[in-house]
Image (spheres, grey):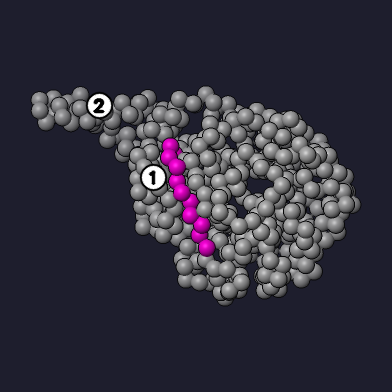
Amino acid sequence: MSYPRVLQIEPTNKCNLNCIMCVRNTWHNEQLRDLDYKTYTRLIDESVNRLKRIALYGFGEPLVNHRFENMVSYARTILGDSVKILTVTNGTMFVEDRARKILDAGIDEIAFSIETFDKLKLYRIRIGAENYDVLTNLRELLRLKKEYDVRVGIATVIMRSNYKELPKMVLEAANMGVDFIVFSHLVPYYESMVSEMAYTLASKQAIMMIEKLGVEVEDLGRKAVYDVLSQIYSGRSTGAKVQYLLLWKKLSEKNYSINPDIVKDVLQKKRFLNDVEKTLEEARKIAKEKGIEARIPSVYADANNRSCPYINEDAAMVTAAGDVVPCMDFAYAHPLYVNGHVKWIKKIVFGNLREKNMEEIWNSQRFVEFRKVRKNMSKTIPWCADCPFSTRYCWYVQDNSYDCYGNETGCNECIYSAGLAHCII
């Protein structure tokens, strides 16, 4: 029977910070806990000769679990050196003594979550970080890196308030000896963060076609309606209907659609989006020149170029409760503010490791079908940002139960599938 190639395992969903963009701020009745250690060891024992990578992190701070280094050590001992073990941390607890223990346990890759090297700005983003010295911890880890075979990286959330600093961050990170940097756009879990978005979910190709035609979509739509009425009642035509249908024909030939509301929003903030694009391109250029590995997203989506990072990697996630979920986004219930509306994301659980083993859960009919549908997302999953109904609060954008293609569990507004937000797995 088949088995995941990658497991993301959440050591704990507890955290010592209160970051302004974190989904944990939306939780109300979620039980905070560490992953049961026996459940973890059973999972590792079951995974021998089956995995290529383990990502030991989730929505909590991994090092809050006092057995984190034991988790690393156990995985290394049982699974051997061929399996890569990584974590993402806020860096607050990565002080020298604990850092050495984790490195001695055999971890391969560590990413610090840092949005800026300006301490005061960092403290405003990562509330509570002022009680720690994250940047000193990073520098100390980079010093220890010389003694261990470990890759050290930085994971950064891109926001309107920090995007201009990103090229400088890449340069400083490279000069410090950081191996890689991952930029990921903000996922807005609450309305107050929508203004911090530095991207759009609209397809750039569709926007470019509209710009090339030199039309204002909403205005053209109104004129087309008047044109139809004019033909009915007076027999005269302004040509607006033909022009409108031609626009949709050109879009559909390329497998695109448009949402006039979102197009209008994009064109209104085009200067800003262009500046973000230019800034990210500068960061990309610096990374190439300095030889630092960089994952940097686009500023636009592309409805015809979507894929699920978990499906691509044959990955599953295990939460601190032992639930097996398809991805981080479906690990906990939360709101998502996207495409001009709020969407309620329900938790999607395929089984719990206290009741069944991973092989049983992974090969269950429901989980197999879930993965099968998402193998070719651009064809099997709709993209709501380019649909005129998504900003009209259509049934299929209210929550993630279904999409308009009839798929159970909707991934039709997933920011990760568009490559705008990145998972480190």
List x then y, in percent, for residue 373.
45, 60
The residue at which mark 1 appears reads as 255
Image point (52%, 63%), residue name: 349
Q: Which residues are magenta?
A: 339-349
- Local secondary structure at mark 2: helix
List x then y, in percent, for residue 102.
82, 56
* Quadrant housing residue 321: bottom right
List x then y, in percent, for residue 135.
80, 38
| The one of 85 and 42 positioned closer to us in this rendering | 42
Callout 2, which amino acid?
Answer: Lys
Asked whether the viewer can see residue 282, the reply is no
Image point (40%, 47%), residue name: 397
Image point (59%, 30%), residue name: 160
Image point (79%, 63%), residue name: 70
Lower position in the chain sequence, tag 2 or tag 1 = 2
Q: Determine if the magenta segment contains residue 343.
A: yes
In whole angstroms, how far apart are the C-alphas of marks 2 and 1?
A: 24 Å
Q: Residue furthest front?
A: 29
Callout 1, which amino acid?
Answer: Asn
Q: Determine if the magenta segment contains residue 119.
A: no
Q: Quadrant of the C terminus?
A: bottom right
| The one of 57 and 124 positioned closer to us in this rendering | 124
The residue at which mark 2 appears reads as 223
- The tally of labels here is 2
Position above or below: 34 against 61: below
